[in-house]
Image (cartoon, rainbow, N blue to C red):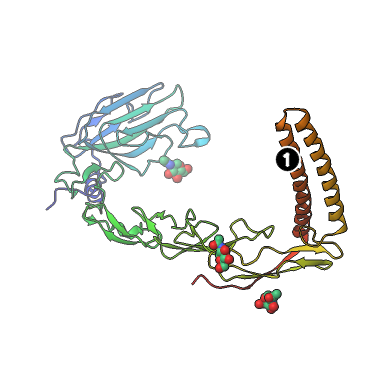
Amino acid sequence: MSKRFTSKAFLFYFSFTVYQNISAQDNPTYNDCGGTLVKPAESYAVLTNPGYDSKYDNNLHCIWTLEGGEKTLLQMKFWDMNIEPGDGGSNTTCEYDYVEVYITTMEESRRFCGFNSPDTVFNGIGTLTVTFHSDDSVNYRGFQATFQVRENFDPCEGDPCQGGGTCEVDTVSLGSKCICVPGLSGENCEIDVDECLSDPCQNGGTCSEGAELDSYICDCPTRWQGHDCEIEKESPCMPNPCMHGGTCEEIDVETAECLCGDGYAGEFCEIKTGCSNPGIPYLDEYRRFNKGTILQFSCIDEYYLHGIENSTCLVNGTWSTELPECYREGTDPGGDEGLSTWSLVMLGLGLAVGIKLIIFVTWMIYKSPWTFFGKASAFTIHDGAQMQRRRASSTRSVQTSSVYSVSDEISSNSKS
Ligand SMILES: *[C@@H]1O[C@H](CO)[C@@H](O)[C@H](O)[C@H]1NC(C)=O
Ligand SMILES: *[C@@H]1O[C@H](CO)[C@@H](O)[C@H](O)[C@H]1NC(C)=O
Ligand SMILES: *[C@@H]1O[C@H](CO)[C@@H](O)[C@H](O)[C@H]1NC(C)=O
């Protein structure tokens, strides 16, 4: 049989012997004002205040002590209580006279007065201290209590805790208490805890018991990693590996595919194919066109198109025609072809200035050695021509930005 007493069985045994006939004759009786109590040779000893047979004196402060150790089990019970109550007859405030009990394992001392014996049986381990106090008036009989002692009390005897658990005495129940190693549980640490029971694997991970007592293994779904599948793997599309505005499409957690815009190819859309923007304003910076794309240009109302209406993106990456231009109805495209009145005037003016300059330069060359100055004059004429061109082109750019309309690729060949 186990030598261990569960606290319940122990208390039952203990109380059974004590609760019956108290006999102060057969058992040691303490009725001095305080002193040292010793373990009674018989089952129990009796404790009363001095003067219990009539009335206690004024101004008593008696302290009894029973020194015990870690294996000393103590029990005390009041059988009679006849002590001046506190204000308003209270048996809890006990401002005037009282008896107080304390055992090492008790959370706090308990103080009593009045005319009811507390039902409580005080159990504990260590040292018992009983204090009786009276003030300078109103005296009653006092109290009578019994106590008993049991040495070598050790609920941990025989080491009931399995798997390396630590046994402790529970100060409330006075039974044994096992502090189990991680991974074990149960009163005697006899149960191997199922670590998977608490569902530790997150995000749909599958739990299985690990090799160690206190361990588990999570089998994580592909998107998740970490011991408890708590870390989300980064998407292969983060950050977007596709260049030139390509769209990243995730195939699985590890692989992704770039969907390239027109005119781009390669794993990361890094290769330029097809044709670049032929000069259409306000196009996305990455906008390109696939080979075979035909753009059809037209002008808005009150403008006419100058140039070729359709332009095709050729295999070698150039457009079949130059960008056409739009001009307001009634105006001339200008430039090289179609000599307008205005350009004739300009040409005349240029010629006049040029001739004058040639005369001047000739004069300078003959009159001075500054040949350099002569070159500069020639440059002036050339620059005059450039100015004309610039005017023409600035006119065009104003017009194109507001009047172009490109009928979006009327035909478009796919990358294949
Ligand atoms: C205090 O007195 C009340 C009755 O007034 C009684 O029921 C109770 O048990 C007493 N408590 C103690 C600790 O004596
Ligand atoms: C431009 O292309 C469209 C559509 O293919 C066609 O209907 C039209 O005749 C073409 N214009 C010219 C000038 O070739
Ligand atoms: C591209 O091809 C066209 C027609 O095949 C040709 O006229 C043009 O010169 C080529 N351009 C280049 C840059 O090779």
Give the number of callouts: 1
Q: Secondary structure at mark 1?
A: helix
Up the image or down, 406 lies above or below 237; here it is below
Q: Is residue 69 visible?
A: yes
* Residue 19 place in picture, x, y as percent: 26, 46
Instruction: Name the residue located 39 percent from the left edge and 58 percent from the top edge.
Output: 224
Location of residue 173 in the rendering, given as x and y in whole percent from the top left corner: 29, 46
Q: Amino acid at mark 1?
A: Phe
Residue identifier under label 1: 379
Q: Residue at x 75, y 58 (%)?
A: 401
In the image, taking residue 205 as reference, residue 332 lies left or right, namely right
Looking at the image, which residue is at 42% across and 38% down? 115
* Location of ligand 3 given as a quarter of the image: bottom right
Outermost residue, left direction?
1
Image quadrant of residue 333?
bottom right
28 and 155: which is toward the camera = 155
Spot occupied by residue 412 in the image (x, y as percentages of width and height): 59, 72
Q: Residue at x 26, y 31 (%)?
A: 127
User: Does the closest atom of ligand 3 sit within 8 Å of the Cβ of label 1?
Assistant: no
Image x and y of residue 139, in percent: 42, 28
Is residue 349 shown above or below 260? above
- Label 1: how many residues lie within 10 Å, few (<14), some (14-19) or many (20+)? few
| Relative depth, front residue between 76 and 109 | 109
Q: Is residue 349 left or right of residue 144?
A: right
Indicate the quadrant where residue 112 lies. Answer: top left
